[in-house]
Image (tube, rainbow, N blue to C red):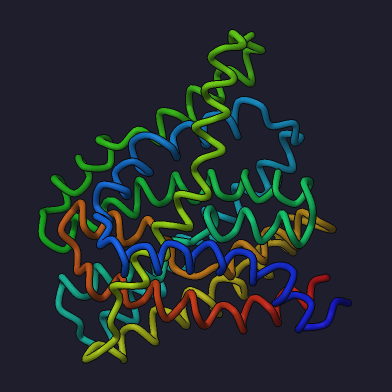
Amino acid sequence: MNTLAEIVYNIITPIFLVVAVGFVADRRFDIDPRSLSRLLVYVFTPFLIFEGVAYSDLSGSEAGQLVAVAMVMSVGVALAAWAVARWARFDRHTGAAFALSATLINAGNYGLPLNRFAFGSAGEERALVFFIATVVVSYTLGVFLASFGRLSARLALRNVFTVPLIYAALLGLAVNVGGVDVPLPVTRAVGLLADATIPVMLTVLGVQLSRASIRGRLQPILMASALRLLVGPLIAVGLAALFGLSGLTRQVAIVQSGMPTAVVTGVLAIEFGADAELVTATILVSTLASIITLTVLLSWLM
């Protein structure tokens, strides 16, 4: 078992060093987070998703298990968050942002490098499958929740079909299953764009954290962070047993389920009119708290 100090130093610190670059850059240059966020949503991430699906070598059963855990766990946390929001008597705008913050997982810009550092390339490959499943959740249920704070259910559902990531996943699946031979120039271009995704995501996270404030919203922020960091992995432990996950696949599924609130949550909040201040503050608190929770989780699993 690795010591807690080794996990923090070797696995978590490199990630936060890149986040710190984005934090400092925003304080120095006042970067426009919406432009960067749109590049992620509409340019970089679709290519990462396409590449991950099109060239994955995981067996169908193993990939299916990871997808099942990711989706069922996310829906479970969303239902728990909505129940807590009703119990706390949050208004519709706050409740939608609260559920959004608790549900969406930073399985990409935080989860992918963390699993790479913790478990190697095989861990990263499994983490990418989990991430793709959470992207589907983010750009379906997440878009719905972000929109539902100010729109009707019908209009919120319509927004789900305006983002390209689901289509990128379907195209990648068609290439993988059909054995399509993609031309080398296209493959290399896709690879360059996909490789840019994680550094840009970490930079955007730093920019978002530089602007976050927890003043006046501490109760919902702490509750959403607890749901994301504690309830998520607890549900994943049960689902891993239910679906028969073992070894590295089980480790990755549980670690990914314990990631903090996703950067894309802030992107969706800004894009679709949710309570962006609450969402961004939850990203800040859950990300900082994850240094402790993920260190303990990795120490238990490794």
Quadrant where the N terminus sits is bottom right
Q: Nearer the viewer, residue 259 or 90?
A: 259
Q: Nearer the viewer, residue 209 or 139?
A: 209
The answer to whether one can see residue 209 in this image is yes
Residue occupying the point 24% across, 58% down: 146
Q: Position of residue 49 (x, y in %)?
A: 52, 36
Residue located farthest toward the right when viewing the structure as drawn: 1
Q: Is residue 300 above or below residue 206?
A: below
Q: Nearer the viewer, residue 114 or 257?
A: 114
Residue occupying the point 53% across, 15% down: 186
Disc tally is: 0
The answer to whether one can see residue 145 in this image is no
Quadrant where the C terminus sits is bottom right
Q: Quadrant of residue 179?
A: top right
Q: Position of residue 34 (x, y in %)?
A: 24, 52
Q: Position of residue 202 (x, y in %)?
A: 48, 57
Viewed as shown, does residue 80 lie left or right of 212?
A: right
Q: Position of residue 291 (x, y in %)?
A: 59, 79
Residue located farthest toward the front when viewing the structure as drawn: 28
Residue occupying the point 68% across, 70% down: 237
